Amino acid sequence: MKAMNKSTIFRKFAGASSLTLATAIAATSVANAATWRYAHEEYDGDVQDVYAEHFKDYVEDNSDHTIQIFEFGQLGESDDIMEQTQNGILQFVNQSPGFTGSLIPEAQIFFIPYLMPTDMETVVEFFRESEAINEMFPKLYAEQNLELLQMYPEGEMVITLDEKATSPEDLQNKKIRVMTNPLLSETYEAFGATPTPLPWGEVYGALQTNMIDGQENPIFWIESGGLYEVSPNLLFTGHGWFTTAIMANQDFYNGLSEEDQKLVQEASDYAFEKIIVHIDGLADESLEKIQEASDDVTVTKLNDEQIEAFRERAPQVEDAFIEMTGESGKELLEQFKEDLKEVQSN
């Protein structure tokens, strides 16, 4: 029932009311904007919401400013909140590269399968130290009037299906929901499936009515959104981690005092440290909740040989990434791999 309630909430906010709310926000005088507006893609208590709350706490504890947080659906879908941020209606937005890829093709790098490691310690160290993330990405985001404040991991990607699977052959002709992201579609084509782009608000119903056969998300989101209720077969392939990013409207950020810019940077760093603690063990807790809630759920964790059958299809996705992004993407991918190599050697 939880997921249907959330779907109802989404329908309530995503229509006319979200437009009305966005319009009202836009009418607010910038001169009086001691309240900064921040939208993200997830529900109350999910990872992006926890990050936002820590960001808010730091800003409000260390200044006279306040942060107003908008959860998923209150201002529309992911594309809507990005557009509102670029237009200055929102000051901050948290959006995954899955959606940002339409603006910044290089951001799709996180959807190259088996590029990222699977253990959390290495993943976290990579996000802390990576030159690609901390030096190259901010320049790419700036070209879209976005100040990249922080990229952070949310959890390992897990596929849910209408039946058990252990190989690419088992995914043949399976309609797997993907974000509107060309490279993610390439990944699932490589895996043998039929990628099917859908807005998040339609996913539960599409699974329930067999319009699609599966989808992918971190396990906490599968639990939070109740997806296991209508897609009960969980497949752990180890092919990637879900990544997200907090950004500011660059005109807004550049117009801040040096003191407030420092405040925003410190708040994003503070929230990063808090969220790393939060996600540690979150996947195991979420899986336990799912298994307690439903006897229909199956969990398949592939062994090394089974993973290799998927991994050997990754090079064609890398080729597609370079074709989509050109020399810029090639340089980013090379630096990405170099950063990973350095972290893993340590």
Image (cartoon, rainbow, N blue to C red):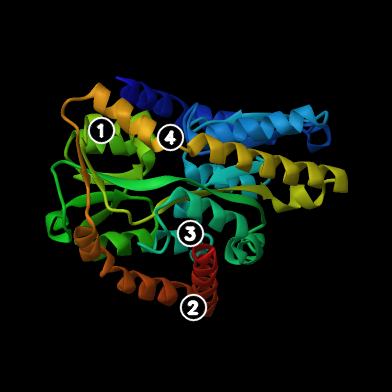
The residue that mark 2 highlights is 326
Identify the disc placed on residue 228. Answer: 1
Question: Where residue 208 sits in the image (x, y, percent)?
Answer: 20, 33
Q: Amino acid at mark 3?
A: Gly
Q: How far apart, in angstroms, are the residues tagged by discs 4 and 2? A: 37 Å
The residue that mark 3 highlights is 101
The residue that mark 4 highlights is 282
- Which circle's residue, 4 or 2, is located before the other in the chain? 4
Quarter of the rendering containing residue 60 = top right
Q: How far apart, in angstroms, are the residues tagged by discs 2 and 1? A: 39 Å
- Which circle's residue, 1 or 4, is located before the other in the chain? 1
Question: Where residue 73 sits in the image (x, y, percent)?
Answer: 47, 32
Q: How far apart, in angstroms, are the residues tagged by discs 2 and 3? A: 14 Å
Look at the numbered disc 2 and give the secondary structure of its residue. Answer: helix
Which mark lies nearer to you, 1 or 4? 4
Q: Is residue 6 above or below residue 104?
A: above
- Which circle's residue, 2 or 3, is located before the other in the chain? 3
| Pointer 1 with pointer 4, Cβ within 8 A | no
Residue drawn 60% across and 63% down?
Answer: 137
Which mark lies nearer to you, 3 or 1? 1
Q: Badge 4, how many Cα within 10 Å: few under 14, some, many 20+?
A: some
**Which of the two residues, 230 or 102, is positioned nearer the viewer here?**
230
- In the rendered image, the quadrant that contains the C terminus is bottom right
- Which circle's residue, 3 or 1, is located before the other in the chain? 3
Look at the numbered disc 4 and give the secondary structure of its residue. Answer: helix
Q: Amino acid at mark 4?
A: Leu
Residue drawn 31% across and 46% down?
Answer: 158
